[in-house]
Image (spheres, helix red, strand yellow):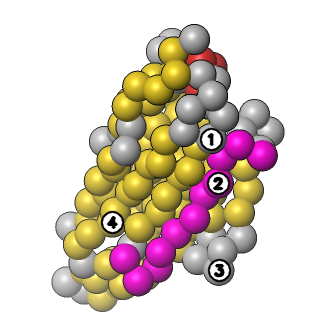
Amino acid sequence: QVQLVESGGGLVQTGGSLRLSCVASGSIFSINTMAWYRQAPGMQRDLVAAITSGGSTNYADSVKGRFTISRDNAKNTVYLQMNSLKPEDTAVYYCEADITYKALYGLDNNDYWGQGTQVTVSS
């Protein structure tokens, strides 16, 4: 059993900052790519940023220069530092991880999602 738990969302004014965290726990063998997605009401879920186990990153154009994704492999944790927030950043933010886990029959692999954390940016 593997779980992802996010924290750090909230209400912030335009121009403010928030830091999201996502911790993976359970029978984890290794974590490959970790990512943050977001979904605004009535919209599809879109990739915000991703980071590989080696630290390579990629970002949506809309957040480049404002958001920074990082991870602590020892803590099975991924972070999203969000600066210069805009009202259009308002959404539920989800953590996603590609995890190799220990099953009874050996190792297996699956994508896991957190429950989401609300980020609201007021104008």
Q: Secondary structure at mark 3?
A: loop
- Sequence-first disc among 2 and 4: 4
Which numbered mark, 2 or 3, is in the foreground of this view? 2
Q: Are marks 2 and 1 in contact (CB under 8 Å)?
A: yes
Vertical position of residue 110 compared to residue 60: above or below:
below
Q: Which residues are magenta?
A: 65-75
In terms of sequence position, does the residue under pointer 2 or pointer 1 come before the other?
2
**Helix, strand or loop for disc 2:** strand
Instruction: Determine contact: label 1, label 4, CB under 8 Å.
Output: no
Task: Find disc 1 in the rendering and name its residue.
Answer: 83
What is the CA distance from the residue labelled 1 to the residue labelled 4?
A: 24 Å
Whether residue 44 is situated above or below residue 60 in the rendered picture:
above
Q: Badge 4 is on which residue?
A: 24
Q: Quadrant location of residue 110?
A: bottom left
**Callout 2: 10 Å neighbours few (<14), some, many (20+)?**
some
Q: Position of residue 30 (x, y in %)?
A: 43, 81
**How many other residues sit within 10 Å of disc 1, few (<14), some (14-19) or many (≥20)?**
some
